[in-house]
Image: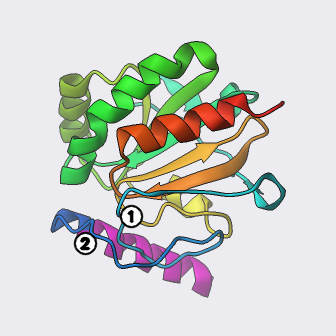
Amino acid sequence: MRAKLFFAAALCAAVAVSVSGCAGNEGSQPQAGDTRFVAGDGKITMFDAASRKAAPAVEGETLDGGRATLAAHRGKVVVLNFWASWCAPCRAEAPVLKDIAAKTKGSGVEFLGIDFKDRKADALAFERGQQAGYPSIFDQPGKIALSFQGTVPPAAIPSTLIIDRQGRIAARALGAVKHSDLLATVTKLSDESQ
């Protein structure tokens, strides 16, 4: 219980720091199992196949009223992006995610957004404006982010977790991802043998 409260506090700290626009580099590399807040610089950390941890169940109602699950994409590489409409780095990276989602869809890569700590009306407006081309689960309380406790948590807003074809967390980026880095990582993971 204490660990859950600690992670919830860390997640709230991430939200508070992101609102103020801080996504700078504090010089530390995220590690698997790290649950403290780390300000993100967008760099992607990949985990070798032997040390990857299984992603928890991810499911919920999408902003458009449908349902989405991570399990529905088993056997594909899945990019999970944790975002909020009020987050400036999220707005900055949205075109990057949209472009790579469109370019990689044919090679077995799926994108799924997780909108949290947000007002639904603001999230819907953001989604309409961005037209990402992939669904986002509306998770206002942040339960999905908390479910990653004990694995590789999204410890900043935005955070991106890349799930391999076996349902394991293969990579994480804290902060807005860079186009070339995300495309290279997704391509490498989609080329891994099944």
Q: Is residue 38 magenta?
A: no
Answer with the quarter of the image where residue 76 lies: top right
- Image position, residue 111 (x, y; %): 50, 30
Most foreground residue, 53 or 7: 53
Q: Is residue 121 left or right of residue 61?
A: left
Instruction: Tell me if I can see residue 64 in this picture.
Output: no
The picture quadrant where one finds residue 107 is top right
Q: Nearer the viewer, residue 73 or 43?
A: 43
Which residue is label 2 attached to?
17
Expressed as whole percent of the image width and height from the top left, the position of residue 3 reads 60, 82
Q: Does 131 sit left or right of 109 as displayed? A: left
Main SS, magenta residues: helix
Q: Residue at x 59, y 31 (%)?
A: 187
Query: Callout 1: helix, strand or loop?
Result: loop
Secondary structure under badge 2?
helix
Which residue is located at x 64 percent, y 20 percent? 108
Distance from Cα at disc 2 to Cα at disc 1: 8 Å
Residue 155: give x, y in percent of width and height. Answer: 45, 66
Q: Is residue 78 above or below residue 157?
A: above
Q: Amino acid at mark 1?
A: Ala
Indicate left or right for 7 with 117 as reference. Answer: right
Residue 114 in sight: yes
Please report the bounds of the magenta region as a residue range. 1-17
Q: Which residue is mark 1?
A: 156
Residue 94, position as x, y percentages in the image: 29, 36
Q: Residue 1 is drawn in which quadrant? A: bottom right
